[in-house]
Image: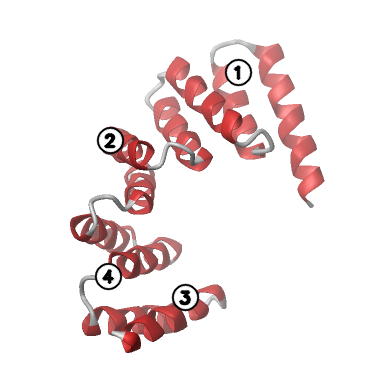
Amino acid sequence: SQLAVAYHARGAAHFRKGEFDRAIADLDESIRRDPKQATVYVSRGLIHWRMDNLDGALTDYTKAIQLDPKAATAYEERGRVHGRNRDFDRALADFDAAIRLNPKNAITYNNRGLAFRNKRQHARAIEDFDAALRLDPKYAVAYANRGLALEETNQLERALTDYRLAVSLNAELK
């Protein structure tokens, strides 16, 4: 319904203003009026994430995936929650699904690289950071993360090069 869309939009505006409780209230109302909108669950999940309510975020992302199994963002965000909960196998499964649905998202490769790095699978982590950087050569965070993985595998010169690039790119962005 149009009103459900309006509540979603207003909730998103409250979120951007940092008014999380008001944002949640509007998204709850949007869902009450039209419970089949996967994007609203993703939006509410993002707010739960920012409020450090990981259970709420996980529930919302899972519901979004149930409503729309092709919602790459829902898999991506749920993977981040699993990673934060240190459930790296589930995180990897969600990042894999997100990449299958949207193979051109550098952030997903970076996040999957982090999960591999946390599992001490450095070669796979570096492959994902490489993929992220192929998609976005100015992605400073991916350079920093690849630098960490390289350092952890004693590739110190390559790590230092990546750290320099990350610092340089961050300086350019400011």
Q: Is residue 62 above or below residue 2?
A: above
Q: Dot 1: what SS?
A: helix
State the CA–CA distance, disc 2 to disc 1.
26 Å
Asked which quadrant contains residue 150, the reply is top right
Query: Which numbered disc flags the more N-terminal residue, 4 or 3?
Result: 3
Kindly identify the residue that appears in the image at 62 percent across and 11 percent down: 155
- Tell whether label 3 touches label 1 (CB within 8 Å): no
Which amino acid lies under the numbered mark 2 shown in the image of this protein? Ala
Label 2 and label 4: CA atoms lie apart by: 23 Å
Asked whether, in this view, residue 167 is left or right of residue 152, the answer is right
Q: Quadrant of residue 37?
A: bottom left
Q: Work out how far the residue at label 4 is from the one at label 3, CA to CA, in angstroms.
A: 14 Å
Q: Which residue is mark 4?
A: 37
Q: Residue at x 46, y 15 (%)?
A: 123
Along the viewing direction, whichever of 10 and 113 lies nearer the viewer:
10
Location of residue 31 in the rendering, given as x and y in whole percent from the top left corner: 26, 78
Q: CA distance from mark 4 to mark 1?
A: 44 Å
Kind of residue at disc 4: Gln
The residue to which callout 2 is attached is 93
Query: Could you tell me the amino acid type at mark 1?
Result: Glu
Q: Are marks 2 and 1 in contact (CB under 8 Å)?
A: no
Dot label at residue 12: 3
Residue 151, numbered label: 1
User: Which colour scheme appears in the figure?
Assistant: secondary structure
Relative depth, front residue between 119 and 104:
104
